[in-house]
Image (spheres, helix red, strand yellow):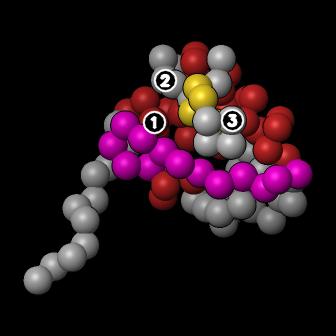
Amino acid sequence: MDTEEPVVPPVDRITAFVAALSDRWPDPTENDDEDSPWSAGPPIGAACGPLIYFPMSWSTAEEASAHAAEVASSLGLNCFDPQARQLRP
């Protein structure tokens, strides 16, 4: 019995969202930039259909999450902050 969940590729807006975030902060698996807020990579690897969950380093989370919320809004996406348990404005 196969227990693996089917892989659902990210929708176009999620792909565009990750690309826009990567313009500012590159994929940590492709760049040794210690200023990257992503604590795991590649960020697109955490995308599934219309959703993406990506972990951030605590030290840069405030700046990165604010930028991510702006980018998400510009693409017509919602950004949920699990620490605040609410959608980001």
Q: Which residues are magenta?
A: 47-59
Q: Which residue is pictured at 72% across the width and 52% down the height?
A: 56
- What's the CA distance linking mark 2 and mark 3? 18 Å
| Disc marking residue 84 | 3
Residue 58: say if magenta.
yes
Q: Which residue is pictured at 68% across the width and 43% down the height?
A: 83
Badge 2 amino acid: Leu
Q: Nearer the viewer, mark 3 or mark 1?
A: 3
**Which quarter of the rendered picture does the C terminus lie within?**
top right
Is residue 21 visible in the rendered image? The answer is: no
Crowding near pointer 1: few (<14 within 10 Å), some, many (20+)? many
Crowding near pointer 3: few (<14 within 10 Å), some, many (20+)? few
| Disc marking residue 83 | none
Crowding near pointer 2: few (<14 within 10 Å), some, many (20+)? some
Secondary element at image label 3: loop
Secondary element at image label 1: helix
Of 52 and 14, the residue lying toward us: 52
Q: Position of residue 19 (x, y in %)?
A: 57, 39
Secondary element at image label 2: loop
Identify the residue position indicated by label 1 in the image.
14
- What's the CA distance linking mark 3 and mark 1? 22 Å
The answer to which of marks 3 and 1 sits earlier in the sequence is: 1
| Disc marking residue 77 | 2
**Which quarter of the rendered picture does the N terminus lie within?**
bottom left
- Residue furthest to the bottom: 1
Of 8 and 89, the residue lying toward us: 89
Residue 86: say if magenta.
no
- Residue furthest to the left: 1
